[in-house]
Amino acid sequence: MAENHEAESSKEARSLNFVEQIVKDDLAQGKNSGRIQTRFPPEPNGYLHIGHAKAICMDFGIAERFGGKCFLRFDDTNPVKEDVEYVDSIREDIHWLGFDWGENERYASDYFPQLYELAERLIKEGKAYVDDQTSEEIAAQKGTPTTPGTDSPYRNRSVEENLDLFRRMNAGEFEEGARVLRAKIDMASDNMHFRDPVMYRIIKTPHHRTGTQWGVYPMYDFAHGQSDFFEGVTHSICTLEFVPHRPLYDYFVDFLSDGSYRPRQIEFNRLNLTYTVMSKRKLLQLVQEGLVSGWDDPRMPTISAMRRRGYTSQGVRNFIDRIGYTKIEEAMISMSLLEHAVREDLNATATRAMAVLNPLKVVITNYPEGKSETVEMENNPEDAAAGTHKMPFTREIFIERDDFMENPPKKFFRLAPGSEVRLKGAYIIKCEEMIKDADGNITELRCTYDPDTRSGLPGASRKVKGTLHWVSASEAVDATVRLYDRLFSVENPSAEDCDFRDLINPDSLRVLEGVKVEPFIAENAKPGTKFQFQRIGYFTPDYDSTPEKLIFNRTIALKDSWEKAQKKN
Ligand code: ATP
Ligand code: MG
């Protein structure tokens, strides 16, 4: 609840971005009878990534802010690459981000009949023709931005012949690639997209919704603007690479609109993030070649991966809010910025608990054998309502191996021979003795505790420099922890000369076995639970986790945790 409230107030506090300003002005001018309608138009050929989240927040955000509607429209114009698995994942991801399209789910394929009808109309008006050339030949005639293209030898076919051929293309009489339908516009246009763009191509693969009903499928440029029109979209918001497509968008819409209503395309800068790739082709390659465990491998930039890793949707949305929307192509946004936003949200919401990743046994020699007591731990110091939980304290405990040094440097405030530390929430202990194996490795510490230093007792306020996290050796539960790092070892894998797959960070996943977690963590290891393992970082149970074999993903490390812990004690 607190989360939602915060989102509300920050939304009000934020000033309008440039698209919102345009929408507001259009409303003020009474355009489209005061109606606001946007759409998010994913192609179901892959899972959504963080870049799509930026578009989703824009499209749904506008509708929310101005009391309009946002449609979810699957841009399913290429059956070869599309699949229902992707449709399902896209729905789930948008819901997770906190948006809902209600009844307004559409498919570009819903409009195939109207698009086909428009294509025939353009043929009849002499504005479209069937070209028998190969795609290579057509590309070779395109010209360059400074030199005009060359007319196709089929450009001046008769209306009758064009109509006959197009119908036979649709009826499946010709092979894929044998013919295309092109708009007859201007092979010398300054805008390359006007040089007789392809409208329809032959595809024989059955479509996941329309089966084998169609033999021809519209290209993006012939489908998108018209679909917007058929659907009633008022503001069609997309990314900057579509700026040169806009005149063509308007050209096709002109055949449909009588002027009383028309959709308007507006472009913003796309999101690029460091240390990852965002191209669906590359992401698909990573999945298909087994370089990651799947689309939701927690190292992927996909929304489903972020969810699995333990990112919160609020954290992701706060990040999107902070980077904002502009008309300028930005080089790259730092991954750290995303991580910061996620960390900030988790700090406010995650349940604190203790786990020891690399355990070292400590025996408290003056603590009675067989005795145990419980100590009360705050669930979240940032949130008084989060309450407390109980943690068992016993004679044998585990501490983090890194928290002990035999020969510590001067400023080492953790445990060392003869030194004292506080066990968080419990007693002060003093290191009396080290036990080593035959190779000289420390296998155990022998400590004594000061029984007067527990909370509520007179010595509770006694100060020592360090505070350590710990778990009871007999009560702790074993777990596996997956530590994730950035998927690539360079900032911009796509800009390097070599194959991007050679740049995968070999340490992007490290698996730790034999991690010890306090019983409270084991009892609450349900999907979606967010923990802060004190002094270590934020963790969440992985989908593979079972009560018999607990597996946690590290969502993100705790920055400056040590310094903070120092200040508090
Ligand atoms: P492709 O079209 O190459 O398959 P795509 O990433 O453009 O990939 P779409 O499914 O077409 O995928 O994208 C849906 C919407 O998301 C589009 O409006 C697109 O502009 C937007 N989008 C895609 N990538 C980004 C990004 N990195 N930043 C912001 N918006 C994006
Ligand atoms: Mg696209």
Image (cartoon, grey):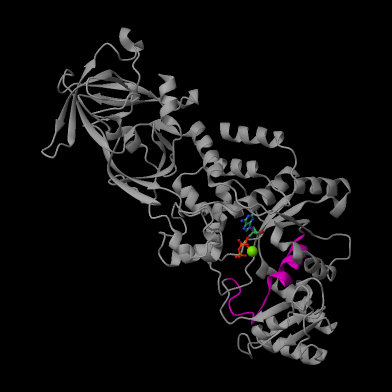
Give x and y (percent) for residue 75: 64, 66
Q: Is residue 485 left or right of residue 494?
A: left
Front residue of 87 and 129 = 129
Q: Is residue 17 visible?
A: yes
| Residue 219 falls within the magenta-colored stretch | yes
Give x and y (percent) for residue 468: 33, 26
Residue at the far front in the pictured view: 410
Give x and y (percent) for residue 225: 75, 65
Residue at the far left in the pictured view: 438
Q: Quadrant of ligand 2?
A: bottom right
- The residue depicted at 49 percent of the width and 44 percent of the height is 311
| Residue 293 falls within the magenta-colored stretch | no
Residue at the far top in the pictured view: 458
Front residue of 27 and 187 = 187
Span highlighted in magenta in the image: 209-232
Q: Is residue 247 above or below residue 268?
A: below
Q: Quadrant of the N terminus?
A: top right
Front residue of 49 and 92 = 49
Give x and y (percent) for residue 207: 58, 74
Q: Is residue 28 above or below residue 116?
A: above
Q: Quadrant of the C terminus?
A: top left
- The residue depicted at 45 percent of the width and 63 percent of the height is 501
